[in-house]
Image (spheres, rainbow, N blue to C red):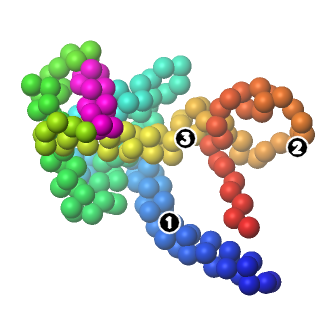
Amino acid sequence: MNRREWLKCVSALAVGAVAAPSWLAAFDAYAAAQAPGAAPQFFSKPQLDLVAAVADIIIPRSDTPGAIDAGVPAFIDQMFANVYAKADQERYLSAMAAFDKAGGKPFLQLSDADRKALVTKLHAESLGHPKDTATALAASFVLMNKKLAMMGFFLSQPGCTEVLQYSAVPGAYHADIPLAQAGNGRAWAVETVLMF
């Protein structure tokens, strides 16, 4: 083994040592979220309902399962109960309170169309420069939920197997085939990255 190969191996081990605990915690949170009848550990029931409503707007059910079907609200609850630091938990809860007031009345009392319009508006605000502090806080709640909903959904079985391509045991090697035959335009659920 030459010096360059040794450095590649050591850097791969260092990255793995840093990233592994957070990924393991995320997988544990997903597994705990799948327990039938699990009560929320971090959120109150009304807070979990609000998180579920926002997650359903972000990833709705269509011809594939949505965030609710994949257990995303319970995943988010488990992430805050077991992974996030106290300061991040408090920031999220204050952003949730600002978000709940952003529509003029509590979010769950809005009509479905008003809920979707508010989430869309605040998402656009989060990508730009919100005008005031309350709007910035409410917009950050939408962005945090989007990130967590996407992570929870694509770690779930429905997200991996029904939305992404998944092959537990890949088949034979087929060289030089049209792109349309190589997965029908869907991304792979398991992607192998060669580090060497």
The residue mark sitting in front, 2 or 3, is 2
Quadrant containing the N terminus is: bottom right
Q: Which mark is residue 126?
A: none
Q: In this picture, which residue range is highlighted in magenta?
A: 115-128
Q: How many marks?
A: 3
Q: Residues within 10 Å of mark 3 (few under 14, many from 20)?
A: some
Q: Where is mark 3, residue-wise?
A: 157
Q: Residues within 10 Å of mark 2 (few under 14, many from 20)?
A: few
Is residue 85 or residue 119 the one in the foreground? Answer: 119
- In the image, is residue 126 part of the stretch drawn in magenta? yes
For badge 1, the amino acid type reads Ala
- The image position of residue 107, as x and y in percent, is 17, 27
Identify the secondary structure beneath mark 2.
loop
Examine the rendered structure and indicate whether residue 6 appears above or below residue 178. Answer: below
Quadrant containing the C terminus is: bottom right
For badge 2, the amino acid type reads Tyr
Q: Residue at x 65, y 48 (%)?
A: 190
Q: CA distance from mark 1 to mark 2?
A: 31 Å
Query: Of label 1 and label 2, which has the lower sequence position?
Result: 1
- The image position of residue 160, as x and y in percent, is 58, 40
Examine the rendered structure and indicate whether residue 85 appears above or below residue 54. Answer: below
For badge 3, the amino acid type reads Gln
Q: Where is mark 1, residue-wise?
A: 19
Q: Would residue 39 be seen by someone viewing this image from the given angle?
A: no
Q: CA distance from mark 1 to mark 3?
A: 22 Å
Classify residue 178 by image quadrant: top right
Q: Which mark is residue 173?
A: 2
